[in-house]
Each structure stands twice: as C-alpha cells, then as structure tokens.
Image (tube, helix red, strand yellow):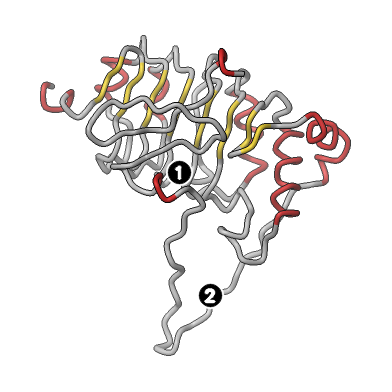
Amino acid sequence: MLHTESLVSLNGTQLSYMGHDAKEIPHFLGDTYGQFAKRLDLSFNQLRSLAGLKMFTELEELVVDNNLLGNDLQLPRLPNLHTLTLNKNQLTDIEALLEHLADVTPSLKYLSLLGNEACPNQLVSPDKDEDDYQRYRYFVLYKLPQLKFLDTRKVTKTELMEARARGAFMKVVKPKSEAVPNEAGSESRSLPYTPLPRGSRDAKNHKGVFAKCRYIYYGKHSEGNRFIRNDQL
C-alpha cells in the first residue's frame, strides 16, 4: 500500500495519478480518496475505461487527457462535475458522447475534446476547416446548452442562439478514409498529432487548454490542466 500511495500526488482535495501507464483506475484510489477528492487528474496513462470513478462521489473536476478512451466510454453519474477534459483520446462519435454526458454530468460547464476525431479541425483532419469546427461547436452547445467553455474558447451568447436555432443540423460527419498503401505495399501510418500547445505534450510539462489557466503544482509529473474557478468568471 505504501508503494502505491507513493505514486499519488495529493494537495488537499486535488488528486493526481499521472503517467503510470495504468490501463484502468486502480481500486486503491477510489477506496482511499474517493469520498473526499474533488479534482482528479489521470492524464498520460493508457486508460480504456473509467469504471473506477464510481467511488468518487464528490468529484467536481476530471482530467483524463492523453489516454485511450473510445466510443464505449461510460461515466458513472457525477452530479457535481463541472469540468471535464478528454483531450487526445480516441473519441469519434460526438453525438453518443454528448448524449451520455447530458445524462450523467448535469452540472457540466467546462468541456474540452481537443485531439479527438470527434472534435474536427485542420490539425486532426486536413480536409476540415474553421467552418467545420464552428458547426461542431453549435452541435455541442445544442446538446449541452449549459456549457460556459468549450475547448479553448468561451461560449458566446451568439453561439447559444445559433445552437438553439440550428444546432440539431450541425453535426459534422467525418467520412471513413481508405488506407493508402506505401511503396512497400503496407499501409501508411499517420504521424502522431497534437493540437495542444507545445508545453502540454508530455507528462512532465502538462499545461491547461482553456483560455485562462491557473497552474497548481503538485507531484513530480504534473503541472496539470488548471481551469477557471467560479471566482474568476
């Protein structure tokens, strides 16, 4: 137990378990910290499931950037969660994700999906442009109208009005791309990609992605995503 706890960074109610290549949330995290942790950073692991979150009954902020979470993502009901960042995972089905979040995170105000195919931009797909990204924003806000921040930008009144009026028709569909064989006859592999600032690309220098950030340092691996608090709005 002492060894596992040494991998955890704890600052009051803020808990970090970053960069340990975990494929699932360790049981000891929920057993030990689940009843009081309000902020949990699980970035830079290899998580494919967040089933272990059911023990975190008081969670308000969840950061799971740089993992392997896909369209089968299931969160427990987290009534107090107001901040969720899922940057650089493997999410492609935006509609299913948003419907799930609407059901289990009723207090959500800050959401970031950068680095997923579900969030279209030219850094993810060369065939996407700013218009595609703006349509994505309208669709997200149609599904989650309570959001205050989406990705790196504050939600505007104009966006909310447009989302209410036309958001249902703004879903951006990414066509299936056919693999192009290289000269050796094997499928070409895409280069690693990140839309995030250079400083947020590794576990040793993980910075926020919202427009205003506050850094709170705890633990040898984490400079973590820090977000706008209520008193900064």
- Secondary structure under badge 2? loop
User: Is residue 213 or residue 169 the one in the foreground?
Assistant: 213
**Above or below, 208 relative to 229:** below
**Above or below, 184 relative to 40:** below
- Secondary structure under badge 1? loop
User: Is residue 1 or residue 66 the one in the foreground?
Assistant: 66
Q: Residue furthest top?
A: 36
The percent coordinates of residue 128 (x first, y second) are 67, 61
Q: Label 2 crowding class (10 Å Cα cut-off): few <14, some 14-19, many 20+?
A: few
Taking 12 as reference, is 73 left or right? right
Gap between marks 2 and 1, in whole Å?
23 Å
N-term mark: 2 or 1: 1
Which numbered tag is attached to residue 193?
none
Q: What residue sits right under mark 2 in the picture? A: 179
Q: What residue sits right under mark 1 in the picture? A: 69
Q: Are marks 2 and 1 in contact (CB under 8 Å)?
A: no
**Above or below, 91 relative to 150:** below
**Above or below, 47 relative to 1:** below
- Going by the numbered disc 2, the residue's amino acid type is Ala
Q: Which corner quadrant holds the N terminus?
A: top left
Question: What residue is drawn where x is 63% and y is 35%?
Answer: 150
- Going by the numbered disc 1, the residue's amino acid type is Leu
Q: Which corner quadrant holds the C terminus?
A: top right
Question: What residue is drawn where x is 46% and y is 68%?
Answer: 190
Q: Label 1 crowding class (10 Å Cα cut-off): few <14, some 14-19, many 20+?
A: many
Q: Residue furthest left?
A: 2
The percent coordinates of residue 194 (x first, y second) are 47, 54
Residue 214, by quadrant, is: top left
Taking 203 as reference, is 77 left or right? right
Question: What residue is drawn where x is 11% and y is 21%?
Answer: 2
The percent coordinates of residue 9 (x first, y second) are 25, 24
